[in-house]
Amino acid sequence: MFPMTVLLWIVAASLLGGVLSVLCAALFALNARAHWVNALVSYAIGALLGAVFLDILPEAIALSGSGAALSGTILFGILLFFTLEKLLLWRHCHHDHCEVHEPHPHDAGAHGPHGRSGLMIMVGDTFHNFVDGVIIAAAFMADVQLGMVTALAIIAHEIPQEVGDFMILLHSGYSKAQALTLNLVSSLATLVGGVLAYFALQSMQHAVPTLLALAAASMIYVAVADLIPGLHQRTRLRDTLEQVLLIVAGVSSILLVNLAVAA
């Protein structure tokens, strides 16, 4: 049995992380500071990769003792998330002009010309938030420090994603209040996923290393397949240096959390 404090950590991280990311995203979206969002994307890449390679994978290997099995799980996970993204439109666009969100004549309806796109985005985001909750729970059940680092990395990449979702909803004809409410409700799926995973994994502790490996695959996929390609659209040397520095800052923040928790 895991102590109740672990459940409290999971609830706090899931609830605070979801609500905090949505509120920060609303702040950015309402003020339309595109440069801030671009900076957040670079920072999120560093936080995700830092959490994977400095915390999640070492902990998973220590728990399982089989690096080969975990490597296979990560490979499977990357292919799985690619397939899910294709089949379920599980997108992480950080602007409103990606191919999934382009307007189509048949989307016209009660919520404006993009109404159906907005609803699809929320369905995909809710599913993704649920998975984030499972990842947070698995990390906290392995180690509280690992849970903190994982939650930080997830929050870091959720903010620019939520900004994109917020903008899609506004362009779909929803009011600012409706867009904020939908995003807040969707964020509660993180809490649901975290609590369900806590009780489900009580009797499945052997599955924690596998879940951590899948969490690593998810973060690697988001960082490499989704976030990094967007950075290549800005080719000036100044932009590149800024991106590299912010990625390093993301990795450094993971290190600082480790040092703070270990102290």
Image (tube, grey):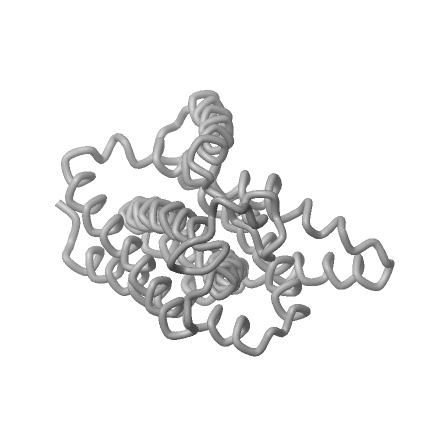
- Left or right: where 156 falls relative to 22: right
Q: Residue 239 or 58: which is nearer the viewer?
A: 239
Picture coordinates of residue 168, whole percent (x, y): 51, 59
Quarter of the view holding residue 260: bottom left
Q: Residue 237 or 252: which is nearer the viewer?
A: 237
Q: Residue at x 15, y 44 (%)?
A: 199
Quarter of the view holding residue 47: bottom right
Q: Is residue 258 visible to the viewer in this orientation of the structure?
A: no
Which quadrant, please, contains the N terminus? top left
Quarter of the view holding residue 99: top right
Q: Residue at x 63, y 70 (%)?
A: 36
- Left or right: where 227 falls relative to 195: right
Instruction: Work out whether 53 lies above or below 36.
Output: above
Picture coordinates of residue 154, whole percent (x, y): 44, 55
Q: Residue at x 83, y 54 (%)?
A: 235
Q: Residue at x 42, y 61 (%)?
A: 262
Q: Residue 246 or 263: which is nearer the viewer?
A: 246
Which quadrant, please, contains the C terminus? bottom left
Q: Residue 235 or 65: which is nearer the viewer?
A: 235
- Left or right: where 84 falls relative to 127: right
Instruction: Work out whether 240 lies above or below 65.
Output: below
Picture coordinates of residue 171, whole percent (x, y): 52, 62
- Left or right: where 247 falls relative to 177: right
Instruction: Work out whether 177 lies above or below 89.
Output: below
Instruction: Work out whether 220 lies above or below 181.
Output: above
Q: Is residue 32 visible to the viewer in this orientation of the structure?
A: yes
Picture coordinates of residue 70, whole percent (x, y): 44, 27
